C-alpha cells in the first residue's frame, strides 16, 4: 500500500486517533477531551472540551520564534501601495481593532459583519473578531445592496465594519452608499458601523451609529487584549453561499476543528513551511480567502500576501501582465493559489512574461474553484515548470475534498481530474434517483460524502439545522449522505472528474452564484413578466449568466431598439442589486419560457440549447414552441 493510501485508510478507519495526532499541529489552552462526537450525526462535534483560539494560533503563537518575520504582506496595485507587517506588528494591529470592537460592545458570540475591500484592515478585523470569540461574517465587497441586505438580515450583526471604497481596474467603487442602501432594505439594524477611510470616496456618517475607525483605533494604540479561550466547537464564523433558493445559506464553522483542518492541510496538501511566503490571489469574501489568505498560512507560520487589484496591472498602475510573478520573485513565494479563470486571463498576455522572472522559489501552483481545462493547465504547467495542483472543494468543506497530498507522498496529477479523496473524506458516487452506489469505472452520478464529515467541515446552516439536513443530507433518496450537488465520475485508478452542478448553481470566474437570486432581481423590474436564468459555457469565465425574459409589453419582441434598451436596464438592475459578477452576459426576450406541464422551468433544456447540445428528454414539456424561441434567440439565423 502506498504511503498516502495508508494515511487515508487510517483517517477513515480510525478517525479518532488520526485526528488526535493532527490536533497536535495547533496549540490548545486545554487539550481536547472527546476527539469525535457523532451522537447527533450527521451533526458532528470535533475536539469538544478542548479550548483554543484561531487568532492565538495564527498570530500570538508565532511571536516567540518569528515575531520579526513577515506575517502579512499587503499589496495594492489599485492604490500603488505595498506594506509588510511582521507577526509582532500584526499582533499590535489586531489588538487595536479588537479593543475598538470591544468599546463598541462586541463580545463572545456577537456577530460582526465585514464588508471590505482587500486591505490589511480587513484581515486585522477578522483576526480581532476571532480573538474576542465574536463571529465574523465577511460579505464579498463586489456584492451590492440587495445581496448585502439579505446577509445583514440573516446574520443580525451587532457591528458592521466597512470602508469608504474598493477599487477595481482604477475604478473606485464607493461602499458606504451600498451599505446605507442595504441597511435601509434590512429590518435588522446594527448598533454601530465602523468605517475605515482610505480617502477614495466621501462618506455620509450617521450620528451615533457610524464611527470613523482611525481616531478610535488611535485611542487603543497600546491596547492589550488577551485571546478569549473558546471551546473547540464554538462558532468562529459564518460565510454565505448560494444554493437553489434565492435565500443564501450561512455556512457555519467551528473553531478547533477548523484550526486543526487548516494546519493539517498546510502540511499535507500545500506543503507550506514556517518562514516561507504563501500567495493566494482570492478575496477575503470567499472561503479560499478565509482558509488560505488569512488563517491557513498564518497558522503555519508563513507570510501571506494579500493582493488588491487585477492580475494585469502593476504597482505604478500601468498595464503589467507579470505583476503576480514579480511578487513571487520578490517575496520568494513557495506556494501559490489561484483560479483557472485568472490563469486564462494571464494566458492572453505575452506568453514570454513568465520567463522574465526568477520563479525558482515556487514549488507548486494550486488552482481551484471551477473545472481546470487541459489547455490552461498545460500552458501554465509548461511556463512555470512546477506541479499544477487542481483541488476541488466547496464553501461548505472549508478545505480540499479532492486533490493530491504531496506533503504526505508525491502523487501524480491527471489532467482534467482534481485528484483523489483527501484524508477524512469518505467520498462516494451515487445514482441520483435510486441512491445506489456506483462503484464501476467512469459511471456518472452525484458526488457525496458520508458522515462523519472531517474537522473544518461546516457545522450546520447558521440558525437553521433543519435546512442543513433537508438541503444537504436528504437529497439522495434513501440515504443520509452529504450531497456536493456536483456530478462526477471516478476512473479505474480512483481519480475523480467533476462534471458540473446538479442544481441551479452556476460558476462565474470561479465564483458561485444561484440563478434564483439573479432571477429574483430581474423579476423586480417593472417591465418583466417572467424570467429564467441559466449558466452558459464561456471560454474565459467558465460560465456566464444568460437571461431569458418574457416582457410585460409584447411590443418589445418585435422592436430591436426597445429590446436593447430593456436589456441594458435589466443588466444594470442586477449589477446594482447583486453586484457586477451576477450581471447577465445577455438578456434575450421571448414570449414564453419552456416549462413542464406542472409549471417547472426547464432550465437544463434551456442551457443545453444555449450551448448547442441536445436538450434531452422533452416528454414533459408544455409548449415545444417556447424552446424553439430560445433556440432562435441564441442562434438568430
Ligand atoms: P464554492 O462553494 O464557491 O467554492 O463553489 C464550489 C463549487 O465550485 C463546487 O461544488 C464545484 O461545482 C465547483 N468547483 C470547485 N472547485 C472545483 C474544481 N477543482 N474542479 C471543478 N469544479 C470545482
Image (cartoon, rainbow, N blue to C red):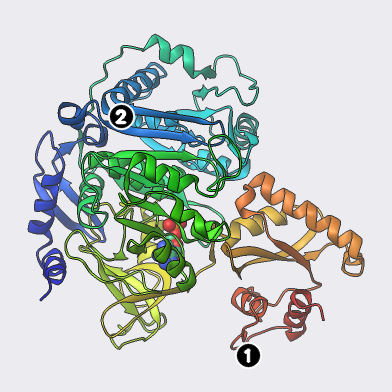
User: What x and y, as percent, mark residue 413?
Assistant: 31, 71
Q: Name the residue under label 2.
A: 108
Q: Is residue 223 left or right of residue 548?
A: left
Q: Is residue 112 above or below residue 20?
A: above
Q: Which residue lies furthest to the top in this view?
A: 219
Which quadrant: the N terminus?
Answer: bottom left
Label 2 beta carbon within 8 A of ligand 1: no
Q: Is residue 466 left or right of residue 425?
A: right
Is residue 592 depicted above or below 318 in this figure?
below
Of residues 290 and 200, the one nearer the viewer is 200
Residue 371 found in image quarter: bottom left
The answer to whether any part of residue 501 appears in the image is no
- Badge 2 density bin: few <14, some 14–19, many ≥20, Cα 10 Å: some
Residue 575 lies, with reference to residue 63, above or below; the image says below
Residue 407 sits in quarter: bottom left
**Residue 234 image offset from top left, x and y in percent:** 26, 40
Residue on which disc 1 sits: 619
> Residue 218 or 139: which is nearer the viewer?
218
Amino acid at each position: 500500500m502506498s504511503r498516502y493510501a495508508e494515511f487515508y485508510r487510517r483517517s477513515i478507519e480510525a478517525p479518532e486517533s488520526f485526528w488526535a495526532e493532527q490536533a497536535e499541529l495547533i496549540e490548545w489552552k486545554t487539550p481536547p477531551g472527546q476527539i469525535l462526537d457523532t451522537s447527533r450525526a450527521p451533526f458532528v462535534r470535533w475536539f469538544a472540551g478542548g479550548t483554543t483560539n484561531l487568532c492565538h494560533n495564527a498570530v500570538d503563537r508565532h511571536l516567540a520564534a518569528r515575531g520579526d518575520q513577515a506575517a502579512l504582506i499587503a499589496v495594492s496595485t489599485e492604490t500603488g501601495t505595498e506594506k509588510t507587517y511582521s507577526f509582532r506588528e500584526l499582533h499590535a494591529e489586531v489588538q487595536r481593532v479588537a479593543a475598538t470592537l470591544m468599546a463598541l460592545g462586541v463580545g463572545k458570540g456577537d456577530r460582526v459583519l465585514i464588508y471590505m475591500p482587500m486591505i490589511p484592515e480587513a484581515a486585522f478585523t477578522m483576526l480581532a473578531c476571532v480573538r474576542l470569540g465574536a463571529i465574523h461574517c465577511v460579505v464579498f465587497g463586489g456584492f451590492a445592496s440587495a445581496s448585502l441586505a439579505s446577509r445583514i438580515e440573516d446574520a443580525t450583526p451587532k457591528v458592521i465594519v466597512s470602508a469608504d471604497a474598493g477599487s477595481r481596474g482604477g475604478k473606485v467603487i464607493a461602499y458606504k452608499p451600498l451599505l446605507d442602501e442595504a441597511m435601509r432594505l434590512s429590518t435588522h439594524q446594527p448598533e454601530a458601523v465602523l468605517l475605515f477611510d482610505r480617502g477614495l470616496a466621501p462618506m455620509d456618517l450617521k450620528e451615533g451609529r457610524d464611527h470613523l475607525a482611525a481616531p478610535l483605533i488611535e485611542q487603543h494604540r497600546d491596547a492589550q487584549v488577551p485571546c478569549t479561550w473558546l471551546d473547540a466547537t464554538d462558532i468562529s464564523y459564518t460565510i454565505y453561499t448560494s444554493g437553489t433558493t434565492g435565500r443564501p445559506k450561512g455556512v457555519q464553522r467551528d473553531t478547533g476543528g477548523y484550526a486543526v483542518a487548516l494546519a493539517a492541510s498546510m502540511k499535507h496538501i500545500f506543503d507550506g513551511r514556517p518562514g516561507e511566503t504563501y500567495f493566494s490571489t482570492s478575496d477575503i469574501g470567499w472561503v479560499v480567502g478565509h482558509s488560505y489568505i488569512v488563517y491557513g498560512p498564518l497558522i503555519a507560520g508563513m507570510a501571506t500576501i494579500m493582493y488588491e487589484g487585477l492580475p494585469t496591472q502593476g504597482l505604478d498602475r500601468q498595464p503589467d501582465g507579470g505583476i503576480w510573478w514579480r511578487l513571487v520573485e520578490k517575496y520568494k513565494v513557495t506556494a501559490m493559489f489561484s483560479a483557472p479563470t485568472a490563469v486564462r486571463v494571464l494566458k492572453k498576455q505575452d506568453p514570454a512574461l513568465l520567463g522574465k522572472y526568477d520563479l525558482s522559489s515556487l514549488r507548486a501552483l494550486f488552482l481551484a474553484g471551477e473545472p481546470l481545462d487541459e489547455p490552461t493547465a498545460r500552458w501554465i504547467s509548461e511556463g512555470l515548470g512546477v506541479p499544477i495542483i487542481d483541488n476541488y472543494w466547496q464553501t461548505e468543506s472549508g478545505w480540499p475534498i479532492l486533490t493530491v497530498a504531496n506533503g504526505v507522498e508525491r502523487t501524480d496529477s491527471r489532467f482534467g481530474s482534481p485528484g483523489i479523496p483527501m484524508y477524512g473524506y469518505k467520498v462516494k458516487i451515487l445514482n441520483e434517483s435510486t441512491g445506489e452506489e456506483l462503484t464501476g469505472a467512469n459511471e456518472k452520478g452525484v458526488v457525496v460524502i458520508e458522515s462523519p464529515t472531517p474537522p473544518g467541515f461546516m457545522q450546520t446552516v447558521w440558525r437553521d439545522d433543519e435546512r442543513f439536513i433537508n438541503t444537504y443530507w436528504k437529497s439522495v433518496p434513501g440515504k443520509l449522505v452529504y450531497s456536493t450537488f456536483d456530478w462526477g465520475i471516478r476512473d479505474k485508478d480512483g481519480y475523480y472528474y467533476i462534471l458540473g452542478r446538479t442544481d441551479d448553481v452556476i460558476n462565474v470566474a470561479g465564483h458561485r452564484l444561484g440563478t434564483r437570486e439573479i432571477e429574483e432581481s430581474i423579476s423586480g423590474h417593472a417591465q418583466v413578466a417572467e424570467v429564467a436564468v441559466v449558466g452558459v459555457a464561456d471560454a474565459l469565465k467558465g460560465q456566464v449568466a444568460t437571461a431569458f425574459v418574457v416582457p410585460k409589453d409584447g411590443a418589445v419582441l418585435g422592436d430591436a431598439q426597445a429590446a436593447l434598451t430593456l436589456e441594458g436596464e435589466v443588466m444594470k438592475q442586477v449589477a446594482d442589486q447583486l453586484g457586477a459578477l451576477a450581471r447577465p452576459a445577455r438578456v434575450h426576450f421571448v414570449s414564453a419560457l419552456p416549462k413542464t406541464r406542472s409549471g417547472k422551468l426547464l432550465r437544463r433544456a434551456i442551457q443545453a440549447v444555449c450551448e448547442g447540445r441536445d436538450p434531452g428528454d422533452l416528454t414533459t414539456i408544455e409548449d415545444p414552441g417556447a424552446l424553439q424561441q430560445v433556440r432562435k434567440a441564441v442562434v438568430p439565423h
